Amino acid sequence: MAIQSVAASYRSPLLIKAVRDIRQKGLLYFFHDLWREKGDPVRVQIGGSTRYLIVHPDYIQQINVTQRAKYGKTVTYAAVRRLVLGDGLVTSEGELWRRQRRLLSPFFTPRGIEQFLPIFISEAQRMRTRWEQLAATGEPVEMIGEMMQLTARIVLRTLFSLSDEAEIRDTAHDVDFLLNFVTQNQLKPLQAPLWLPTKQNRAYHQARARIDAFINALIAKRRAMPVEDYPNDMLSKLMLARDEETGEPMSDELIRDEAITLYFAGHETTARALAFAWYALAAEPEVAAALHAEIDRTIGAQMPTVELLKQMPYTVQVLKETLRLYPSAPIYGRDVLEDDVLGGVTIRRGAQLTLMPFCTHRHPEFWDEPLRFDPERFTPEREAARHPYAFYPFAAGQRICIGNNFALLEMHVLLSMLAAQFAPRRQTGHQLALELVGSLGARTGVWMHIVPR
């Protein structure tokens, strides 16, 4: 696809026409089809707002790396910040973001997250027991929901050391409600103000109050105990972190914001990626056979260790190919803070950008047969030869997701342990219909049967 000197445009002065176009295809494929039809960048004008659709890896590199100071997140993420995440890493900017990134980065190095390996393993074992029961019934399961149960337990144990089943269930329900609430609000052309006592608004305020009270109580409980008795979880790390320049700790409000942000970043997206991995493997018997062979000769009936996982590169290739075709975050936004030029097109200050990993990962200039599921794309040799920004499932540049090492290790353990014993099969007649629900979703779910190997 040639880089153009003038941006193609989609114009809709009437909001109702844009809503009709988007409803017809869904927002994900509305943008995807604009890119396929008009090239890149595409200027999308709806009413008085201007947005540019960005796909080409050169532009992704410019926005996130070489000219990153010209772009921000304040306007694009305003609703998420106000309604759920506060000043956590996903939504903060400037010096606050730099300070928080410095504080949290040591916790998320490959070595830093290895301490959670026993939690990943124990939850995989728990899911094995559940799947044995499901396999005996023969009933289909919705795999995104199945994986979300698993990753919610993991993130709540690693964040807060939760073990009580009811507490895990209730906390996961409240946080998921908040995230779904803000996602649905962003997708609506008209939104009821928060002060209006609608049923959904009341439910939002109640869930938000419960989560705030829950985290505040945990913080207060720990502050009342000796530091040496703190559990070894993320909440304790947040509470004990000190700025290397000032020696200052985080405020309780900021601890709350970062805790919710870590839940947000480490739960739903990981679950969706795993669900799509199972779906893809069920359609590719040769890939599944290669995966099973690697698992059988490496861990077999053993529990995985970091050393054994390093001997399983094909499993990682399967996960990366899943994230290529089914990126959990298929779209994300940036604000234009200063005028810039992308491919000869002047992008003015005040415009907003929609960056689309979903499309970049399917770009025919960088991916042969882009719709084919092929883990061999991610051998070290082929990765080294490819444009460094043709694949960016965790975003890119300084704002790359801080939890990417956590997510990859978690998925590696869960996929290898469950695939050692099971080979889920697609439900007959089920058709996958992808859609944007904040992260990548499936309109009709991902329905599968749990089948023992």
Image (tube, rainbow, N blue to C red):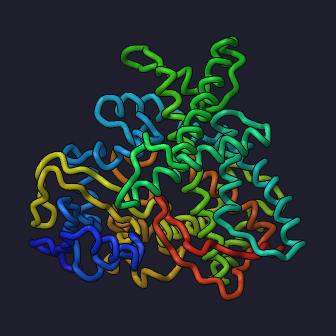
Quick one: 48 or 59, which is closer to the camera?
Answer: 48
Q: Position of residue 106 (x, y in %)?
A: 50, 33
Residue in the picture at 53% in, 30% down: 256
Q: Position of residue 411 (x, y in %)?
A: 63, 57
Q: Quadrant of residue 353?
A: bottom left
Asked if residue 453 can be seen in this view, the reply is no
Question: Which residue is situated farthest in the front direction here?
Answer: 197
The N terminus, quarter of image: bottom left
Q: Viewed as shown, does residue 297 lie left or right of 194?
A: right
Residue in the picture at 33% in, 62% down: 389
Q: Viewed as shown, does residue 171 lie left or right of 6?
A: right
Residue in the picture at 67% in, 79% down: 282
Q: Position of residue 24 (x, y in %)?
A: 39, 79
The C terminus, quarter of image: bottom right
Q: Quadrant of residue 368?
A: bottom left
Q: Quadrant of residue 219?
A: top right
* Label total for image: 0
In the rendered image of this protein, does residue 150 appear above or below residue 424? above
Quick one: 171 or 277, which is closer to the camera?
Answer: 171
In the rendered image of this protein, does residue 375 appear above or below residue 284? above
In the rendered image of this protein, does residue 149 appear above or below residue 450? above
Quick one: 382 or 390, which is closer to the camera?
Answer: 390
Q: Position of residue 302 (x, y in %)?
A: 82, 56
